[in-house]
Image (spheres, grey):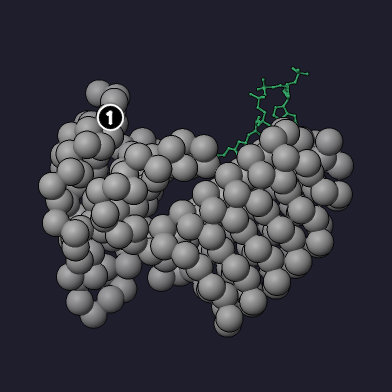
Amino acid sequence: MLDLVIIGAGGFGREVLGIVRAINEASRDVRWRVLGFVDDSPGEADLKRIQRLDAAYLGPIDSLVGQPATTHVTIGVGEPAVRQKIDDRIRGYGLPAATIVHPAAEIGADCVYQEGLVAAGGVRVTTNVELGRHVHLNLNVTVGHDCTLGDFVSVNPLAAISGNCRLESVVLIGTTAALLEWVTVGRGSTVGAGACVVRDVPTGVVVKGVPAR
Ligand SMILES: CC(C)(COP(=O)(O)OP(=O)(O)OC[C@H]1O[C@@H](n2cnc3c(N)ncnc32)[C@H](O)[C@@H]1OP(=O)(O)O)[C@@H](O)C(=O)NCCC(=O)NCCS
């Protein structure tokens, strides 16, 4: 059994707790012992929600200092740029990032991923896909063959990434967005909820609508 701390007491952090518990229920042995949440400024309502989930609030993110090097972390924060900042900040603590894949998520053959992956229930990643560090794939996301997703990419629920797409680092794909095959989304860009991306998206922009522009 491995110890785990979830960074971020907000909605997504608590959803990550749900994924971790589903993993434990599906395993023969309990895989993760969740020590609790760290968060620099949790709201009162979130602290109560954590309590109702029978989980602990451990304090601000710096409470990770002094954790044994065997304690894993997962960054339960959906916003890519914020997740990247947190990762930069905690890198020096030397704690490994957990890989959290819901038992009802499918990751196909020859898919490679780096540490920090969070894949929610219903995710389907087909084949020959590369996922960078701290990639988040939310509920029912599909990622087609030969895609590459850079570090800190977040794909929100029900988005569909067609084959051969390239999402550079720190990209956010909004809920139910569709990406046609072979498109590239540039570093730091956001694709709005419900958009249909039909051509490449440059770096650092927001696109929305059908077709996305
Ligand atoms: C596209 C997005 C990034 C824009 O955010 P924003 O810059 O703060 O946009 P605003 O809310 O100020 O809206 C600006 C305009 O864009 C429109 N708009 C906002 N989101 C839109 C979307 N997804 N598709 C089409 N139009 C959208 C607004 O209606 C508004 O139009 P108006 O100027 O004619 O009134 C954001 O709305 C979005 O879709 N984010 C993804 C959210 C998501 O996936 N949530 C799920 C979490 S699990």
Q: Position of residue 128 (x, y in %)?
A: 64, 76
The residue carrying mark 1 has its beta carbon less than 8 Å from ligand 1: no
Residue at 86 percent of width and 49 percent of height:
199
Q: Position of residue 136 (x, y in %)?
A: 50, 53
124 horizontally vs 162: left or right: left
Residue 124: name its quadrant.
Answer: bottom right
Q: Quadrant of the N terminus?
A: bottom left
Residue 172 to residue 4: above or below:
above
Q: Position of residue 196 (x, y in %)?
A: 80, 46
Mark yes or no: residue 34 visible: yes
Q: Secondary structure at mark 1?
A: loop
Say which amino acid is labelled 1.
Answer: Asp
Residue at 15 percent of width and 51 percent of height:
67
Residue 21: name its quadrant.
Answer: bottom left
Mark yes or no: residue 118 visible: no
Residue at 72 percent of width and 46 percent of height:
186
Q: Neighbour class for label 1 at 10 Å: few (<14), some, many (≥20)?
A: few
Of residue 161 and residue 186, the one placed in the foreground of this image is 186
28 horizontally vs 180: left or right: left
Q: Which residue is mark 1?
A: 40
Q: Quadrant of the C terminus?
A: top right
Residue at 66 percent of width and 51 percent of height:
168
Residue 88: name its quadrant.
Answer: top left
Q: How many marks?
A: 1
Quadrant containing ligand 1: top right
Q: Position of residue 144 (x, y in %)?
A: 69, 68
